[in-house]
Image (cartoon, rainbow, N blue to C red):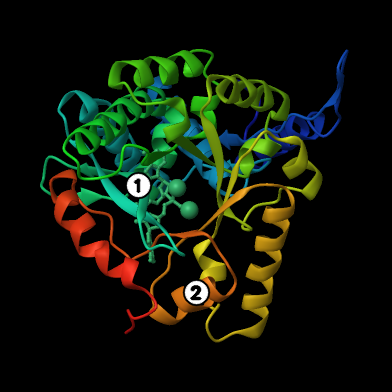
Amino acid sequence: MVLEPDSVSDIEAMKTAERILECFREPLALRQGDVFVSASIGVACSPATDSPSPEELLRHADAAMYRAKDAGRNCIALFDASMLERATQRLTLETALYRALERQELTLVYQPIIDLQLGDVLGFEALMRWECEDGSTSSPAQFIPIAEETGIIVPIGAWALIEALTHLRTWIDAGICPETASMSVNVSPRQLHDPQFVSVVSEALSRTRVQPQQLWLEMTESIMITEPEQALAALRRLNTLGVRIAIDDFGTGYSSLSLLQSFPIQRLKIDRSFISGIADDVSARSLVKTILAMSDALGLDTVAEGVETARQLEALIDLHCAKAQGYLISHPVAPEQMRNTVISLEKFSQWPKYSD
Ligand code: C2E
Ligand code: MG
Ligand code: MG
């Protein structure tokens, strides 16, 4: 925090902020090598008349800082009143999210993943839903980023692991799915960097008596880029347990082929954006073909995400893609519906007779 009593105008305060930001352009020379640090700065001024209280002034600067972050980091934003409303909304959401776990407002829905050659259900992906107090349902795209930023993702993620594995255990015991079925759980970078994460995973497995080989942890390519050393160490420890790692939304991030080769991962999930054009667009099809060939050459398992039409499914089978999930196969469903969902998926084992 910088308090500048001498600035007499917004412009002067902005100039100070610019000078501060400028300092961050130089790398810090650490023993491990040069490190770059980015900064987001929010500026709030206290006019001579009608001045806000010190607490208010801080809140204003904070709201402006969030605006600067949203603008892509390494930015400066000057406070204006419209920012407060957004900050208040955000705070309400943050507080509600803190309570969501203890109030049992969070639930998981599950989407089956099938074997494209045999049509069998191989496993499930757990996807989080938040049924807010007012009865509305919030999508993870809205609340997961906030949970990540505030760190609430750590307890929420630990709960999701136990919950998903408990359901898998129940379905196996009830004969709803095969003994070997797997559960995929999405994991945020923040969770992976939590020193307790590996023991949380191992505890969840032993409590639910699920084999480590049946658990897939899905992470996006970003984990390979931010703090790669730390991520690498955590992934190795998870692999040692027997747990496997999938790269989610593959193809949408910035990971290089060399990172892909050096990270201990076992599965690529081809992002929906590539699958959507696969039936009609020659270049989309070539791209998927290339990803499949690369994945195969690296000895990785592949899952196609977001299959919505029978023609896409057909194209994937032609390309020898092994596994898929998507609305065509099944939407994510509540755990109580899984028995019926699995039964209705038997039609896929009669593929290729099955069509639109
Ligand atoms: P994701 O892991 O890539 O999950 C796939 C998303 O695509 C899900 O959205 C799913 O409902 C949706 N989807 C599945 N099939 C189709 C399809 O055929 N067409 C279309 N248009 N969409 C399809 P959802 O549930 O809204 O989740 C969004 C993202 O939020 C997930 O993407 C994942 O990154 C994150 N997320 C969800 N649950 C969790 C969680 O428990 N922990 C963490 N850290 N992230 C989660
Ligand atoms: Mg996923
Ligand atoms: Mg995905």
315 or 103: nearer the viewer: 315
The residue drawn where x is 77% and y is 33% is 19
Q: Is residue 331 visible?
A: yes
| CA–CA distance in space, label 1 to label 2 | 21 Å
Q: Label 2 crowding class (10 Å Cα cut-off): few <14, some 14-19, many 20+?
A: some
In which quadrant is the N terminus drawn?
top right
Which part of the image, by quadrant, shows the C terminus? bottom left
Q: Give left or right: position of 36 versus 324.
A: right
The image quadrant that residue 169 belongs to is top left
Task: Give the amino acid type for the residue marked by disc 1 in the picture.
Answer: Phe
In this picture, residue 169 sits left or right of residue 215: left
Per the rendering, the mark at residue 124 is 1
Q: How many marks?
A: 2
At label 2, the amino acid type is Ser
Question: Is residue 54 positioned above or below 80 on the image?
Answer: above
Give the residue number, with chain letter if any, for mark 2: 276
Residue at left offset 43%, top offset 33%: 215
